[in-house]
Image (tube, coloured by chain):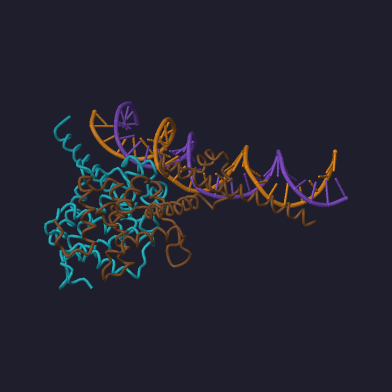
Chain colours: A brown, B cyan, C purple, D orange
DNA sequence: GTGACTTTCTAGCGTTGCTAGCGACAGGAG
DNA sequence: CTCCTGTCGCTAGCAACGCTAGAAAGTCAC
């Protein structure tokens, strides 16, 4: 086997790997689009296969199962959320905390299916100490940065977890129609007021 | 048809209705037990029918479908949560808000499947203005009562919604393993401190 | 007993996630 | 050019799902 032939083979393999990677992403995108258009119940392996114009078994050559596809969508969604939070900058007179909160809630409201895959549907994404996907760390990092200015003497990580939890609770209960839309504004104001280091004089 | 016969018929119908009601409850209990033991994925109509020792179609003579069974479990779960919150009284030096929060989180932790049916799985339970189940109003009412002492000048209903949202966010993210257990205590302390009307002097 | 009515079960439909095993095709060897 | 080999994607099918039609069993007044 000549080195030329080897080189040839390698480039062919590269092309194949590239095509495989493209198809991999195609599946993820199709699953996300289908879920956002018709909800996760509509995302069946048959419909997904039809959408990417391959047969079902092809999906299983890329992902271990349907759960793994949802997980891939979720992780990429975290990357997107991180980007959105990073771009969210306070307008005049607005706190960074408020800008982040509003961006987070808007994301959850506008992309409910994606949000669902990320934070509601239980998946075996390793959130613990081991091998957390970078996209997740990025998103959480953005929240930490937004909380930092109001941290005071409080534990930054715990405070960020509380901020995130509150936003998550609001987002999911709203999505389920369990909160009264009349209070949307007041609820957020109360959260931001409560988390901020005000001494109480600027509360209504 | 004599009046005696009519009376007889009526009592027989009463007995039948009573037996039907008992079986109705039996199905709900079986579904809840099965879900709590093995998760909602394990609650199939076949397994449920087997557990109540009837065939599948019997389930459909009581409920419109599987969703309706889950909904019934959820509503009764709300009643149970309301009772637990009502019994939750602060111990020495503890605020009522903290007692309620701890009881709520303990409920979510100890009965994750039940909690899931109540507040996570989307159902068409009418949360809006029309025909909200009484159990739900009771549970929310208990939260309102717990928030009232710290309300200050703030809108009581919006503040309660925020309190509930924060607890719900903490509960669900914890359940998914998305929060670090190390911060469990600090997170709750921060929430209670933030929501209370402290002037900041008692924050660490 | 008999006939009408209710209740319950058997059996099956269409769909789901997933997989075994076949056929087509590309690339290297002679 | 022809054969061989290994990769690749497809067809077809499995078990389990929610749900339902229609048969079978049971119950009651007469």
Residue nearest the observer in this picture, B6 or B144 = B144
In this view, B109 is above or below B92: above
User: Left or right of D6: which side holds B67?
Assistant: left
Where is residue A96? Give x, y as percent.
30, 57
Q: Does residue A168 appear in this view?
A: no
Q: Does residue B17 appear in this view?
A: yes
How many marks are shown on the rendered structure?
A: 0
Q: Residue at x 30, y 47 (%)?
A: A176
In this view, A159 is above or below D30: below
User: Left or right of A66: which side holds D27?
Assistant: left
Residue nearest the observer in this picture, A90 or B52 = A90
In this view, B18 is above or below B109: above
The quadrant the C terminus of chain A occupies is bottom left
Where is residue B111? Give x, y as percent.
31, 60
User: Left or right of B96: which side holds B171?
Assistant: right
* Residue D12, picture quadrant: top right
The quadrant the N terminus of chain A occupies is bottom right
Where is residue D6? Give x, y as percent.
72, 52
- The extreme front residue here reads A92
Residue nearest the observer in this picture, B39 or A149 = A149
Residue nearest the observer in this picture, A194 or B125 = A194
Q: Residue at x 27, y 61 (%)?
A: B107
* Residue B18, picture quadrant: top left
Where is residue B199? Give x, y as percent.
15, 67
């Amino acid at each position: 086997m000549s080195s030329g032939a080897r080189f040839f083979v390698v480039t062919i393999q590269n092309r194949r790997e590239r095509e495989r990677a493209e198809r991999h992403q195609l599946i993820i995108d199709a699953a996300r689009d289908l879920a956002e258009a018709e909800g996760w119940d509509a995302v069946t392996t048959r419909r997904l296969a039809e959408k990417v114009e391959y047969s079902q078994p092809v999906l299983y050559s890329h992902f271990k199962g349907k759960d793994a596809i949802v997980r891939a969508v979720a992780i990429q969604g975290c990357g997107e959320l991180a980007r959105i939070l990073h771009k969210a900058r306070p307008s005049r007179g607005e706190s960074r905390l408020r800008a982040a909160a509003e961006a987070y809630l808007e994301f959850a409201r506008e992309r409910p299916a994606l949000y669902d895959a990320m934070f509601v549907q239980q998946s075996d994404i390793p959130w613990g100490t081991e091998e957390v996907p970078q996209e997740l760390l990025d998103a959480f990092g953005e929240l930490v940065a937004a909380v930092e200015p109001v941290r005071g003497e409080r534990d930054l990580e715990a405070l960020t977890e509380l901020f995130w939890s509150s936003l998550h609770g609001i987002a999911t209960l709203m999505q389920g129609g369990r909160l009264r839309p009349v209070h949307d504004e007041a609820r957020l104001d109360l959260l931001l007021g409560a988390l901020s280091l005000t001494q109480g004089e600027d509360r209504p």
